[in-house]
Amino acid sequence: MEVESVKADILRHDTEIRSLMDRMAEADDVLFAYIQQRIKELHSRKSELERKLQTKARKRKAIDTKPLVEPLAMWDTLTVQEKHDVAAEMIEVIYISHHNEDIEIKFGV
């Protein structure tokens, strides 16, 4: 399963969970129990997909850290702006999951 496909599946699960949660307020006891069970199933599947995504992320190739050696060696002497410039140069995007408190940093070098 491709990383983008896993991310799309996670998004679909999130969307369905939100939709079901919106319906809970209007549900009777029977429907409420059904919705609650479906949400539990979706959450379980989503958690499984997130674990797969983390496993795939760990299998990626190692990052070439040579360009970081000099800036990191003098990191304590850099100004905040210089630290920002180094980070902006090296980091392409940061993904933050509030659900499982996971952070993924994609480097652009």
Image (spheres, rainbow, N blue to C red):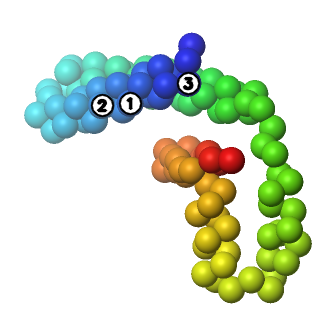
Q: Is residue 9 above or below residue 109?
A: above
Q: Residue 59 placed where, x, y %?
A: 75, 27
Q: Which residue is drawn at 38% across and 30% down?
A: 11
Q: How crowded is mark 3: few (under 14 residues within 10 Å), some or many (20 or more)?
A: some
Does the rendering let one see residue 34?
Answer: yes
Does the rendering let one see residue 44?
Answer: no
Three-letter amino acid code at the position of disc 1: Leu
Q: Residue 57 placed where, x, y %?
A: 67, 32
Q: In which quarter of the image is residue 28?
A: top left
Per the rendering, the mark at residue 11 is 1
Q: Quadrant of residue 30?
A: top left
Three-letter amino acid code at the position of disc 3: Val
Q: Are marks 1 and 2 in contact (CB under 8 Å)?
A: yes
Q: Is residue 56 found left or right of 63 in the rendered image?
A: left
Q: How many labels does the image show?
A: 3
* SS category of the residue bearing label 1: helix
Q: Is residue 107 above or below residue 5?
A: below
Q: Is residue 43 found left or right of 88 in the rendered image?
A: left
Per the rendering, the mark at residue 3 is 3
- Which residue in the protein does label 2 denote? 15
Q: Look at the image and tell me in which quarter the N terminus lies.
A: top right
Q: Residues within 10 Å of mark 1 (few under 14, many from 20)?
A: few
* SS category of the residue bearing label 2: helix
- Distance from the alpha carbon under mark 1 to that under mark 2: 6 Å
- Distance from the alpha carbon under mark 2 to that under mark 3: 18 Å
